[in-house]
Image (cartoon, helix red, strand yellow):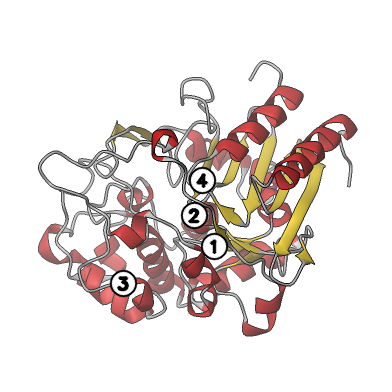
């Protein structure tokens, strides 16, 4: 590892402080900068029940931060020529064209504007391991808006929409594409998963729920669309340790979420930035604004590239316009920026209702590696 010693020490000190104070229980942070691994830090326990310590090789189920892997597979799929961003989903998946979704394209899926943000009624966490059942339900769903006209966070539907397009185009599930197109070529076997093999389950960290904040300190709830109530089901909005520790969920191919090490996913995005996975001529497609509007699920302003929200956590898209990535429920965070050359990843075992840790570590990293950021 080639490190920036002062940043490595600073990050390690923050992680140790967070664990010692009880604010966090187990953490990993990895940062690449212009081709070099400059931070590789861990602290705390991977499993506090057994006392097993966190290591850089410990995979952590990190909820929606895993969407960085899903979006990358979509870009690699387009790179094969098997599908284009503006290919209608129904061209590969005819059943999906029902009930007004015939115009939905892969571009709409990647910008969360396909119109099916919520899992159809009758689909719950126990059904996520049943790929045909979920995809049949999505194919029969009525969109909440005409595809391409609005955006709204497709929490769990996103991964199945991308994944079924990829499966129809290649004949292979997302877990295999992630392994064959990303993990194996980069030497990251054991670091990136959609669906963890049974033999690898003992290596995983064990998640834990944080105690709820006092009411006066609680973060405000997301706004619901006027007159329409909540769009997502409660289980789609609130991550729990029970879901993240479920062997059925962990072993299932659910590419709306993911299991990975901070070291592995930061290395993956570093390979995106330096052209090993996506040619430099296409990198602009990952950071160009593809949709801008009001998120119809949460009510916040949204600026999206193809497959990623734009802007580093804690900043506005205008301040960090080329930064792309995803956060995960409970506080995990992955981002990368082609201008600064930074690829950052944080995984954690305690599911907090805020992103304080991600914000603090992102700010420290950006200040050290691009002081004007």
SS assignment at label 2:
helix
Report the Cα–Cα distance between label 2 and label 3. 19 Å
**341 or 221: nearer the eye?**
221
SS assignment at label 1:
loop
**Contact (CB < 8 A) between labels 3 and 1?**
no
- First in sequence: mark 4 vs mark 3: 3
Dividing the picture into quadrants, the one containing residue 131 is: bottom left
Instruction: Say if residue 357 shows up in the picture.
Output: yes
Residue at image mark 4: 327
Question: Label 4 crowding class (10 Å Cα cut-off): few <14, some 14-19, many 20+?
Answer: many
Report the Cα–Cα distance between label 4 and label 2. 9 Å
Residue at 11% x, 63% y: name it. 99
Residue at image mark 2: 67
Residue at 49% x, 76% y: name it. 252
Residue at image mark 1: 258
Closer to viewer: mark 2 or mark 3: 3
Question: Label 1 crowding class (10 Å Cα cut-off): few <14, some 14-19, many 20+?
Answer: many
Residue at 69% x, 33% y: name it. 341
The quarter of the image holding the C terminus is top right
Residue at 71% x, 63% y: name it. 46
Q: Residue furthest top?
A: 372
x then y, percent, for residue 172: 49, 76
Numbered badge on residue 136: none
Numbered badge on residue 124: 3
Dividing the picture into quadrants, the one containing residue 202 is: bottom right
């Amino acid at each position: 590892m080639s490190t920036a010693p002062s940043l490595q020490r600073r990050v390690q000190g923050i992680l140790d402080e967070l664990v010692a104070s009880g604010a966090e229980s187990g953490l990993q942070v990895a940062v690449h900068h212009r081709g070099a691994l400059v931070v590789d830090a861990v602290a705390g326990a991977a499993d506090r029940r057994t006392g097993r310590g966190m290591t850089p090789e410990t995979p952590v189920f990190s909820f929606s931060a895993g969407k960085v892997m899903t979006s990358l597979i979509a870009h690699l799929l387009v790179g094969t020529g098997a599908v284009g961003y503006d290919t209608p989903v129904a061209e590969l998946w005819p059943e999906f064209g029902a009930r007004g979704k015939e115009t939905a394209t892969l571009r709409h899926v990647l910008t969360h504007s396909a119109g099916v943000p919520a899992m159809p009624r009758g689909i719950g966490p126990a059904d996520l391991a049943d790929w045909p059942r979920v995809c049949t339900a999505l194919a029969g769903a009525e969109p909440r808006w005409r595809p391409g006209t609005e955006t709204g966070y497709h929490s769990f539907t996103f991964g199945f929409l991308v994944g079924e397009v990829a499966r129809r185009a290649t004949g292979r599930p997302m877990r295999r594409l992630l392994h064959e197109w990303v993990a194996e070529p980069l030497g990251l076997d054991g670091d990136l998963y959609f669906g963890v093999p049974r033999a690898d389950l003992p290596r995983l960290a064990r998640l834990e729920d944080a105690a709820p904040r006092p009411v006066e300190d609680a973060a405000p709830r997301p706004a619901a669309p006027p007159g329409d109530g909540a769009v997502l089901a409660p289980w789609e909005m609130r991550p729990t340790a029970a879901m993240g520790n479920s062997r059925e969920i962990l072993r299932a191919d659910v590419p709306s979420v993911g299991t990975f090490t901070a070291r592995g996913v930061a290395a993956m995005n570093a390979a995106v930035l330096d052209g090993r996975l996506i040619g430099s001529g296409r990198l602009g497609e990952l950071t160009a604004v593809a949709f801008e509007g009001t998120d119809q699920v949460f009510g916040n302003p949204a600026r999206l590239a193809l497959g990623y929200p734009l802007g580093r956590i804690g900043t506005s898209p205008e301040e960090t316009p080329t930064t792309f990535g995803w956060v995960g429920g409970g506080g995990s965070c992955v981002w990368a920026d082609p201008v600064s050359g930074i690829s950052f990843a944080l995984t954690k075992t305690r599911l907090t209702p805020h992103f304080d840790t991600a914000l603090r570590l992102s700010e420290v990293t950006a200040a050290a590696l691009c002081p004007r950021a």
